[in-house]
């Protein structure tokens, strides 16, 4: 019998961080948090969970991305600028903070526009630091396919973030 | 074709995004809310499976009872035919 309060206490932080970063909004992150554990509960009825942290990360990422996409399709464009984030452990001048917030806003928009599997692979790899093998396990694809998904995701994001590219990279994007 | 390996600024941006601070959480209230939600799902599920079990048991009981009554009637009819 799964001890759910214990599971939530142990892995709740992972789900919260994942959802809150992507959604940039406490209320949405709270909804996503609950959906994540309900989904985990439903999964646990049909199979034995071997790796709770990876599962919680994947479920939270998927739900947060779904919500991000829905916000975008509903025309709620305030994906990123409603609650500006302070960069961790750094004090930056206001223009730099504004620029970074705009970058994060564009990143969220870019992730919301990517096909679901690319966005998920990208988040798991670059935001959650999962290995290719872990991502392949979680997404139930081959390691090579993970590479393809990341390749495509990076190309799309590169075009989306062209304005933030260093000059040499930007000229490459425009070519 | 653009070589994605050269698009380091994308990875840099994602890295900065990863390092950005996130509001502390989840609150204790949110944790207990999630645990309560799962508990209620779990209770609903067991009540549902219990009710399915009960309805099946009642059905089997009726089938068995019908069999007994039918057997009894058949025996009475056979006895009546034998006597008559």
Image (tube, helix red, strand yellow):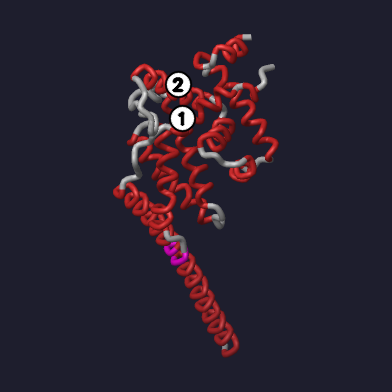
Q: Residue B69 lies in magenta, yes or no?
A: no
Q: In the image as oriented, which residue stretches furthest toward the bottom?
A: B83
Which residue is denoted by mark 2 in the rendering? A103
Q: Judge by depth and name the residue closer to the eye, B40 or B60.
A: B40
Disc 2 vs disc 1: Cβ atoms closer than 8 Å? yes
Residue A77 vs B28, above or below: the answer is: above
Secondary structure found at label 1: helix
Q: Residue at x 44, y 45 (%)?
A: A14
Quadrant of res B47: bottom left
Instruction: Identify the image quadrant of residue B10.
Output: top right
Neighbours of disc 1 within 10 Å: few (<14), some (14-19), many (20+): many
The front one of A57 and B18 is B18
Identify the magenta region: B50-54
Q: Label 2 is found on which chain of the structure?
A: A
Q: Position of residue A45 (x, y in %)?
A: 51, 56
Q: CA distance from mark 2 to mark 1?
A: 9 Å
Q: Position of residue B17 (x, y in %)?
A: 46, 30
Judge by depth and name the residue closer to the eye, B19 or A175: B19
Q: Which mark is residue B17?
A: 1
Q: Most prominent secondary structure in the magenta stretch?
A: helix
Check the picture and name the quadrant holding the C terminus of chain B. bottom right
Instruction: Give the percent coordinates (x, y) of residue A133.
Output: 64, 43
Q: Characterize the local packing of mark 2: few (<14), some (14-19) or many (20 or more) Cα atoms within 10 angstroms.
A: many
Image quarter (top left, top right, bottom left or bottom right) of the N terminus of chain B = top right
Q: Residue B3: which disc?
A: none
Q: Quadrant of residue A49?
A: bottom right
């Amino acid at each position: 019998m799964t001890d759910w309060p214990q599971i939530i206490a142990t892995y709740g932080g992972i789900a919260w961080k994942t959802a809150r970063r992507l959604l940039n909004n406490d209320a949405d992150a709270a909804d996503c948090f609950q959906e994540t554990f309900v989904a985990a509960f439903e999964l646990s009825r049909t199979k034995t969970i071997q790796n709770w942290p990876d599962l919680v990360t994947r479920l939270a990422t998927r739900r947060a991305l779904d919500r991000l996409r829905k916000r975008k399709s509903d025309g709620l464009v305030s994906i990123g600028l409603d609650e500006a984030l302070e960069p961790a452990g750094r004090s930056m001048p206001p223009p730099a903070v504004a620029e970074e917030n705009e970058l994060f806003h564009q990143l969220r928009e870019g992730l919301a526009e990517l096909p679901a599997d690319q966005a998920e692979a990208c988040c798991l790899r670059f935001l959650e630091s999962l290995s290719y093998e872990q991502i392949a396990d979680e997404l139930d694809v081959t390691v090579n396919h993970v590479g393809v998904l990341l390749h495509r995701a990076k190309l799309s994001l590169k075009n989306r973030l062209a304005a933030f590219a260093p000059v040499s990279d930007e000229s490459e994007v425009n070519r | 074709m653009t070589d994605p390996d050269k698009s380091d600024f994308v990875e840099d941006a994602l890295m900065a995004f990863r390092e950005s601070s996130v509001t502390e959480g989840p609150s204790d209230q949110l944790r207990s809310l999630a645990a309560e939600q799962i508990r209620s799902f779990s209770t609903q599920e067991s009540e549902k499976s219990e009710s399915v079990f009960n309805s099946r048991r009642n059905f089997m009981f009726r089938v068995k009872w019908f069999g007994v009554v039918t057997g009894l009637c058949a025996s009475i009819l056979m006895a009546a035919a034998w006597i008559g």
